[in-house]
Amino acid sequence: MRTLHIDTGEKMQGGQWQALYLVGGLKDAILLAPAASVLFAEASKTGVDVRPLTVLTLRKLARQVDVIHAHDAKAHTLAAVCCTDRGGAPLVVSRRVAFPIKRGIASRWKYGRAKLFLAVSKFVANGLVRAGIPQDRIRVVYDGVPIPPLSTRSPGLVVALASKPVQIPGIPVDHTTLLWEGLSLSEGLILKGLDRASVFVYKSDLEGLGSAALLAQAAGVPVVASDAGGLTEAVVDGQTGFIVEDNDFATPVKRLLEDRVLAERMGMAGHERVLREFSVDVMVRNTLSAYGELIR
């Protein structure tokens, strides 16, 4: 099966990492990305067949592949305009964001061009259904994350990821490492921050899934996360961490810091769950299965 992947992002964010992981795990896959993008540079290092994204190249390759996969909103628009009415391969679209879909005529036309949507969570899939996308055109394919070797935790070290400052009452500032969502974090930076952490805090108002929470659990770190969108699928409350309401992070964080046996048990449970359900290999396998439904 020959597949064509399109991503228009200039920075290396969660969706770009997923596109790179997927293409790297497929045979006979081509990636189109802006020549000046970080994704293009990263893909070039790995030996992936990556080519500069142009309309001419997209139209040409659309007739030479079995599946076209758009990985972001602009790529979805580009593929819908350039490929779907020109005898190209069926269009698959990844939907990783949780905000509502617009209901205008242009949006309805655009979403009508895709043969299949790969929702990053059940929460996102339900949003697609509410927007009028038939359920038989939606499959849930969770993000896949690399599984790092487990390392020794540093008692008392809390790593927090948020778009705004996080204050955890009772937790000393020098015991908290803050990673800001607005800085276009690389997964390498997140993993570096987690290599010794004993607790990971993920504060968000709305999240498609929360791949950083998966990265934390893959590293064996229990997660305390907001009750927001797909985060409730990434973290199993009471098993791999805690889901909190009303930004009450202090209570579960203190509990994990004080009860190292509980923290280690949750960390190991999260590691095993990510290995079983959210590894890169699982993501690639589930994506291939979805492709197969289109071309049988």
Image (cartoon, rainbow, N blue to C red):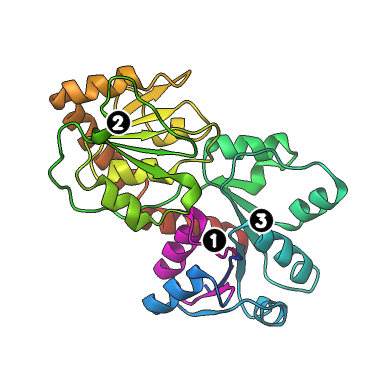
Q: Which residue is mark 3?
A: 73
Residue 44 falls left or right of residue 75: left
Judge whether 33 appears above or below 167 on screen.
Answer: below
Real-space CA distance between mark 1 and mark 2, rounded to the nearest whole angstrom: 33 Å
> Which numbered disc flags the more N-terminal residue, 1 or 3?
3
- In depth, the one of 55 and 189 nearer the eye is 189
Judge whether 14 appears above or below 202 on screen.
Answer: below
Question: Can residue 24 be found in the magenta stretch?
Answer: yes
Q: Which residue is mark 1?
A: 292
Residue at (37%, 22%) from the top-left corner? 249
> Which numbered disc flags the more N-terminal residue, 1 or 2?
2
- In depth, the one of 133 and 181 nearer the eye is 181
Task: Tell me the crowding category of disc 2: few under 14, some 14 to 19, or many 20 or more residues within 10 angstroms, Cα based.
Answer: many
Question: Which residue type carries mark 2?
Answer: Thr
Q: Which residues are magenta?
A: 9-34
Question: Which residue type carries mark 3?
Answer: Ala
Q: Is residue 104 something one can see in this rendering? A: yes
Task: Tell me the crowding category of disc 3: few under 14, some 14 to 19, or many 20 or more residues within 10 angstroms, Cα based.
Answer: some
> Which numbered disc flags the more N-terminal residue, 3 or 2?
3
